[in-house]
Structures are given as C-alpha cells and as structure tokens.
Amino acid sequence: MIDYNHAAIEKKWQEKWERDKIFKSEIQPDKEKYYCLDMLPYPSGNLHMGHVRNYVIGDVFARFHKMKGKNVLHVMGWDAFGLPAENAAVKNKIHPAQWTRQNITRMRGQLKPLGISYDWNREIATCDPSYYKWNQWFFIKMWKKGLVFRKNANVNWCSSCNTVLANEQVLNGLCWRCKNHTGRRNLKQWFIKITDYVEELLEGHKQLVGWAEQVLLMQKNWIGKSFGLEIYFALTGTCERLKIFTTRPDTLFGVTFMVVAPEHAVISEMRSKITNYDEVLEYVNASQRKSDIERSSNKEKTGVRLEGLSAINPATKKEIPIFVADYVLTDYGSGAVMAVPAHDQRDWEFAKKYNMPIVEVIKNNKCKYEKKFVYERAYEGEGVIVNSGEFNGLESIKAVNLISEWIEKQKFGRRITNFKLRDWLISRQRYWGTPIPVIYCEVCGVIPVPEENLPVVLPENIEFTGLEESPLKLSGDFVGVKCHKCGGDAKRETDTMDTFVDSSWYYARYCDAHNDNAAFDSLKVNYWMPVDQYIGGIEHACMHLIYSRFWYKFMRDLGMVKHDEPFTNLLTQGMVTLSGSAMSKSKGNIVSPDEIINKYGADTVRLFILFAAPPQRQLDWSLEGLEGCWRFINRIWRLYDIVHTKAEVPASEKDKANILRIMHRTIKRVTGDIEKEFQFNTAISAVMELVNALYAYKYHLNDDGVSVEAYKNVVLLMAPFIPHFCEEVWEMLGYKKYISECLWPDFKESFIEQSYVELPVQINGRLRGKIVVRVEVSEDEIKKIAETDKKIVPYLKDKKISKFMYVKNKIVTIVVD
RNA sequence: GCCGAGGUGGUGGAAUUGGCAGACACGUGAGACUCAAAAUCUCAAGUUGCUCAGGCGACGUGCGGGUUCAACUCCCGCUCUCGGCACCA
C-alpha cells in the first residue's frame, strides 16, 4: 500500500468537487433545505486561525446535513468596508478599494485549500456598489417608515489632527496618531430607530431555542428593560424641573442629593445660577476626554457640586444639592439620578467622599444583629420602610407600588418602562463605507436620493491624509449636486454608514446574490431563510446579532421575508490562542494557516481544530496535538489493508457481535454529538475508539462482512471532518459516488443494547466494589448479590444497614451505621 | 465598574446533567520490530502512603463554607483568566 499523500489527495478532490459543482446550491422545493452560515470575515489581509476554526466548524454542519439528504446552502463573502482600509490608505498611500480587493484575493486563495464546501458562485463583497446600493435602498425605506432620524451626538475629536476618531483610536484619552488629548465634538448625525422594535427583539427570544442561554441573557441585559418611575425634582428658585429615572421609588425619602452626567443640559441651561461654573466646566471637559468605560470603572468616584443650584426632594420637601459626576451615564435614563446613599453602593461611596447625609429608609429585617448597615456600606436589598412618613412600617417590596401611586397622584412623576438599548447611530465621518443617500437643498430641505438614482457611488478621486474632517467633503463633484426636486443647488451628505449595516442583511443577499433589480427575490429568500445554523464569535452576541434581528423584522414588515427571526440556531465559537493568549500581530504569536496546511494538509488541520476543544471553548494551538491528528489519519489509512487481509484465526461470532455493537454505538454517538451537542471533539474520539477496537482485533479480522462494514462506517463518519481523505478511501473501497453526496449511516439500537451491566457499589459514599448483573434483575436480587459479594461482605460485617438504594443501571448505594 | 463565560492529571480535554472523576488524545516511560534510528504496533501511568508485589488505603475537579447516602455538577461567599460595554470588526 502506498503512503498517504495529503497534497495529491486534497488537490485531486478539490478539483473534482469544483469540476462537478457538487456544492452548487439551487432551490429544490421537494427537498428539505439547510442554510449554514459562517459570519462573514473582514478582509484584513490574512486568514488567521480564528477564521479557519469558524469555517471548519461550519463545514462540518454543511457536510453532515448534506449527507443527511438535505439541500444545503453554504456560502462565503466579505465584510469589505471599514476603518483599516482607510488607515492603510493613509499609511501606505494605497486606495482603500485597491487594498481591500487585494486582501480579498489573497484571503480567498488561503481559504480554498481548506476544502470548505462553499457555493462560491454566491460570493459577495459589501463594498461592491451592487451590494451597498441596497443599503441605501433600505435606508430610504426606513426613512419612509419613520425609522431614520437625525439628532446631535458626540464623536471623539482630535483637534490637532482635525479629525473624528474611533474609540480604538483613542488610547488613554490620547489620539493614537499625534498623542494629544482628545475631546468630543457634537455633530448632527443619522440614527436608526431600533428602539421601535425593542419589545419584539425581547419577545423574539422565545423563538430562539437554538441559541445558547448565555447569548440570550447577554442580549436581554443589553436591551435592559426595566420598570420604574420618571420623577421630577423642582430646581429651587426656578420653574424648571430635573427629570430622573429610578427603579427604586421605595427609596425616595432617602434621596439626599442629585447627580447629573457631565453632558447634562441643565449645566449650560442653569449657567447663570451656577456660581462655580468654571470649576464645573473644567470637570466636564476632563470627563469628556474619558471613554464611558474609563468613567464607570473608576474606583474613586469624582464630581463637582453645582454651587448655587439645588433641588427639592418632592417627598421630604428638603432642599438637596446637585452634583455633576462622571459615574452617571448620559445615555441611560435621563442622564441624571436621585442619589440614595443608604441603598446604592455607588451613591454611598460618593456621599462618603463629599460628606453628604446618609438617610436609611429601608431596614434589613432579615439580619439578626442590629448592625449599623448603612454606615458601613449601602444596603441594596429588601426590608421594612423607615423614615418615610406615611409609608413607615411597610414591606419595601409592597411599598414600591404604593409610593409609585402616591407619586403619580401628587403629579411629580409617572410610571414608565425604560430600556438600556439605544437607537443605532449609523453616521460615520469616513470614506470607506456606504454613502448615506441624502441631499441638503437650500429650498427643499433634507431629502433622500430617489430610488432610481441609486446607488450613490463613492468617488475615487480622494487623497487620504488622515487629517481631514471627513474625506468625502474633499470631493467637490460628490458634494455639489442639483436638488432632485427643485433643480437648485444642493449638497450631498458626506457621512457614510456604520459597517454593521452591511452585515445586518447579507445573509438574505446570499440567497439571490446576483440580483440587479432588487435586494433579493422574496421567493428565493423565503425558501432558504431562516439560517438553520449560524456560526461566529461570541463577541457579536449583542451588537451584530441585535442589528440583524432588527433588520430582518424590518424586512418582514416590508413584506420582503416571511419569518420573524433570521437565525434559528446559533453557535458561538471560542478564540484560538497560543499558550493561552490570543494570537495577534502585535504579540507576534501568529500561526499562519497556509504554512500549516501546506505541511500537514487541510484534513489534519481540520481534524485538530475540531478535536482539540469543543467549538464554544477557547482552543489552544499545539503542534504536538496537530501531529497526533496526522497520525490518526494515517492509522485509518493503514486500517484499509488490515481489514482487507484474510486472518489466520478468524474472529469468533462473539467478537463479531462486539465489533458490530461498537460500530452501531459509534454511529449513534457521532450523530448525536454533531446534531444535538455540537461536540465534534467527542464525536471524533468515538470514532477513535472504533478504530482502536478494529486494531485490537487486527489478527482476527477477515476480508468480509463485519470488519469491512465497520471500516466503511469509519470513513462515512469521518467524511464531514476530513472530507478529502474520506473521498479517497471511499474510492479505494470501490464506490463511484462522491462520499460527500452519500447518505449518513443509520444505527440500530438492538445492536447496542447489552444484557449485562456492571454496577459500582458504594458504602457510605465510598466505592467498595463492583458487581455484574443482568440488566433486568430486580432491586431485591441486586441487594442480595451486593450483600454477598466477597469484596462487600467485610464492610458490612457487624454493621447495620440503614439504607439501601439502587439507581437503575447506574449505581448501588449502601449506608451503614 | 456593569453584563456574560470559564478554572478538572505534566498538557488539550471527557463525565449519559446529582451516581465509578480523568474517556479520547498529546507528552512521558517500558517492550516488540530494526544492524541502528525513524516510523509502526503493544503495554503502563492522577497524587501519595503502606505492601506478603496479588493488592489495600488516604487525598484529589481555582479557594472557603453548605445541602445530600452521593457534588466537577446544586446553593452561599471569594479569587483569578477571558469576551462585551454601543465609532475595531
């Protein structure tokens, strides 16, 4: 037998698959469809192991379900807009389009040798006008439905570079390029009103039974629905009121001061009243240099009192001071809080630092000791209301409703539902993205570009310096337009769209990738959608996976798609690391997939990635582990000869039955592991056990029936994991059809069942022996067998059995005094 | 800081979801084959203490406590690592 030659085999089968177009997908109404989707990659320039892992996992699903007889759609494309292309343009004087195209070509070239079962006919790149035209089209549809609007929002701004900075371009409050302090700039920007769908995004979770609980929980917390009250605090000496949101009206009597976020409008509106305005302004400016995360993760709370301004606690009627502090978030609630230091730890810390009174209004009645709770730390739990006038003595949980009613009756507040989810800011002051299709006419105002004029194409003639306010403003041809309505002078919008727009509906475009007349044909999308299995990183749990769900619901409301949710099952894969830390260029610990594939072959790489860890968990790269997989493939290769050689002492009937039992059990385990548990690592180890069993019988196998049958199933079961190898062996076994197009094997339970079972016997929780019994033996008989077992007897001598338990086919437990 | 996940032998991981902890593999050691090496095949092994060399016992799933006949699994409290926090994608 010749040696296993991965290079020749992989090339041979990749060419055959392509020649016979076996992964080309077309609608077959009579066949059950299966849409397998890998999150589309950003073409950064090099395929990394994280990509490889993503696509190999996807390929197992795609190939497995194809073998299950389904009509599979499995596709690849490029999330081609984004910041790195513009950075490259500045740094290397290469146009973003050219840089991106080069990267796509390179990465496609790295991807193909992996032998993933993609239908490459449907490949898309989001930077193609034929794709982003439809982003613009959807934008206008949303406009018409009242789902887009403009409002002011802050951007990171570097005044020395005169440019907007992304969050990742601000390092410790400094511009990454010039190292100067950054600030904020308030710009009028475009938003999509995803909050209109917030209830449905939450409600839709009930349909997503194929998503991991943790992802749903993350989304739920991100959406952050809470019931509470909006309460108005009068500002002394004015007619104005300060609005706050709270979920704890039961603590209202404990409010001893108020805190507003640095961006809060009250600061500028009450400027004339604030006697230390300069000090306040300095604090505000300092906090604007920090990111939201820096602000909230500050151990030490900071703030400045707004001298000369105070509020009235509507419950106690007492005058209370107002602070500005950056631990209060601008974007949550109304950007102001009522501070209850006794019952909120952050307020407590702030009160301690600024000597604010701490008034206990909820007594912890579960604590036995008379602890001076609120003087040591805030008590955030439930209890009995105190210091709260007519509400004293009530259970705090009941007081929530009563106090809420009272507040509404007194008209200084009302019950509302609040969400953390914010509307989606899609404006980017950048070049390499979808132009927002809007013009500003001096006469007609702000108007969308008519559909028939789409796409609004990105101009090419731009020089990238990294020092411009917005690159598109530099193109006179692009900016200067005539109004579609009145024909007068108008200016084009120069903001482009967030790249999350591109990835919010691409899954639908794959179903009809070359349509020039529409985003897609609904008939096609309704055949393929929803995606049966979506695979990608957990880092997308909140943003991408909420935007996509929103977008799909919007398309449904336009009548374009018929389902409510785009992704039926979601698998979030873990990172690939090298000795525990993430591979990255800066750390210089990158393992390049193409080198490894060259040396060991795609099948070995695929097998290692699938075997070394379950897909959801982190995967640590290991060359030794990879070589082990190489050896396992060779072990299967050599087994071909072993099972086809006549043995001198053939296997007994009992041995044959045993092989068959292991074979059927393996089919059952592999099928279950792939289908239900996504546990490819245990699926592969099950096949390893079958291979080991065949090796154990190697001097007794015959060139007939059982051994060849078992071997054939090894190859079938491994086909989704190491497809090139399995095609080759399949051909050696004499089959004419591609194994990729063969049916997945079935198992029979009757072969697996055993008549005897080995039961561990525990005495007082310790394993003391084992007994072997027939499966159907009764508990009484088991008791007799256990008690008379020679290993057990000494432990029972002179002891009284106080408890005997038998968990069927699992364990025998005896408790003695 | 907030939200989510994870911590099991020398290493990656397994454990039918409360029932024999360590499947399968890597690495290691020993043996077979070989002039030799590699490759291959077979065997051994959590740590540790006794041992008549057949075994027998103790300890052991990040740390501390709890529930239970029984806990990697459930509960309470900590700790470390990782992902996300809305302009990286």
Image: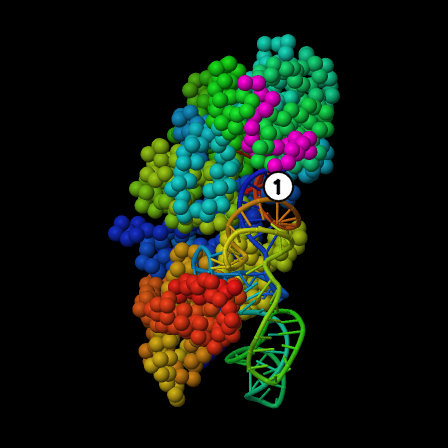
Residue type for callout 1:
Asn
- Residue A787 image point, x, y percent: 44, 72
Q: Who's the residue at 36% across and 32% down the image?
A: A557
Relative to A20, residue A542 above or below = above
Query: Magenta span: helix, strand or loop, mainly?
Result: loop
Rendering quarter of residue A67:
bottom left
Q: Is residue A341 magenta?
A: no
Q: In what quadrant of the picture does the N terminus of chain A appear?
A: bottom left
Q: Who's the residue at 71% across and 17% down the image?
A: A307
Tag 1 secondary structure: helix
- Residue A353 image point, x, y percent: 72, 28
Say which residue label 1 marks: A87
User: Quick check: A351 left or right of A634?
Assistant: right
Residue at the left extreme? A30
Rendering quarter of residue A748:
bottom left
User: Quick check: B21 left or right of A527?
Assistant: right
Foreground residue among A314 and A333: A314
